[in-house]
Amino acid sequence: MKIGLLNAYHFVKGEQTYQTQYSPMAIKYLKSLADDVEVCEYVVAQGEFPEDMQSCDFWVITGSPKSAYDNDEWIEKLTQFICTAH
């Protein structure tokens, strides 16, 4: 099973905070669900999106300090991704 983790935490590269540790914790948890789980992380807050929506069986979106109503380009693109996936 392949799970796509859409990391929506907008961080500053090189800056390690408690919040930037969410992604590794989420990956560790998702991998613990079953022996055959593979997790692919996409840092959508940095503009990194999957090329193909069918590349993963499930999608998980992390939390973010940003609002879904903010006008950031990546938020609009993520909204489109979610709507298309649904």
Image: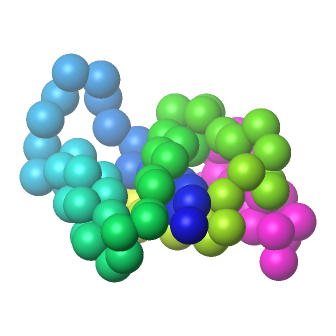
Quarter of the figure with the C terminus:
bottom right
Residue at 67 percent across and 67 percent down: it is 57
| Residue situated in front as seen by the camera: 82 or 60 | 60
Query: Where residue 82 appears, x then y in whole percent?
Result: 75, 67
Left or right of 6 on screen, residue 32 = left
Magenta-drawn stretch contains 58 = no
Question: Among all residues in the image, which is located at the extreme top?
Answer: 14
| Residue situated in front as seen by the camera: 34 or 20 | 34
Residue at 27 percent across and 71 percent down: it is 32
In terms of image quadrants, where is residue 48?
Answer: top right
- Residue 69 seen in the current view: no
Mark count? 0
Q: Is residue 51 above or below residue 40?
A: above
Q: Is residue 53 above or below residue 85?
A: above
Left or right of 37 on screen, residue 48 = right
Left or right of 5 on screen, residue 9 = left
Residue at 44 percent across and 64 percent down: it is 37
Q: Is residue 28 above or below residue 40?
A: below
What is the span of residues highlighted in magenta in the rendered image?
A: 67-86
| Residue situated in front as seen by the camera: 19 or 28 | 28
